[in-house]
Amino acid sequence: MNDAVNNTIVGHIDSKWQAPTERFKRNCDLSEVGENIVYGVMYARSAIMQLIVDDDVPDRGHRLKIYRNFTQVGLACGQFPQYRTIMTNYFLY
């Protein structure tokens, strides 16, 4: 998340052009990783609700990640220059 904030990056690809799976596989032995990002939402509950509704995402990918059988989840929240806030969550399968 620090990379996104420091470089004002919107989306899943970081400043080194790496996807979430590539970033996690450097440090973990995982079969699959999922990442959701929400911008501009002030409360974690509202952010999760937005991801579950998943408007404007035709494949409902955020919702599908939340409802899969993951083994671990991590959340991070912070300030983001363009949208005021950012919340990321990672799912490890």
Image (spheres, rainbow, N blue to C red):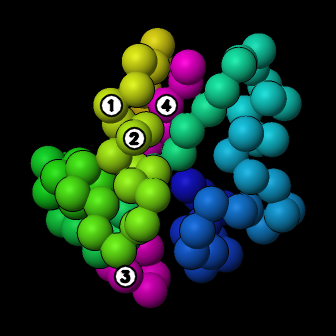
Name the kind of residue labelled 3 in the image. Answer: Tyr
Taking depth in this image into account, of 47 and 5 the one nearest to the observer is 47
- SS at mark 1 in the image: helix
For residue 21, say whether it is visible.
yes
The residue carrying pointer 4 sits among few (fewer than 14), some (14 to 19) or many (20 or more) residues within 10 Å by Cα, namely some
In the rendered view, would you say 8 is above or below 58?
below
Name the kind of residue labelled 1 in the image. Answer: Tyr
Which residue bears the numbered disc 4?
A: 91
Q: Look at 57% across and 74% down and name the residue there.
A: 10
Quarter assignment of residue 70: top left
Name the front one of labels 1 and 3: 1
Q: Look at 37% across and 62% down and name the residue there.
A: 38
Name the front one of labels 4 and 1: 1
- Disc count in the image? 4
Residue 83 shows which numbered tag?
3
* Sooner in the amino-acid sequence: mark 2 or mark 3: 2
- SS at mark 4 in the image: strand
* Sooner in the amino-acid sequence: mark 4 or mark 2: 2
Q: Are marks 2 and 1 in contact (CB under 8 Å)?
A: yes
Please give left or right for residue 23 compared with residue 36 in the image. right
Distance between the Cα atoms at labels 2 and 3? 25 Å
Q: Are marks 2 and 3 in contact (CB under 8 Å)?
A: no
Please give left or right for residue 21 compared with residue 83 in the image. right
Q: Give the residue furthest to the bottom.
A: 82
The residue carrying pointer 1 sits among few (fewer than 14), some (14 to 19) or many (20 or more) residues within 10 Å by Cα, namely few
The residue stretch that appears in magenta: 78-93
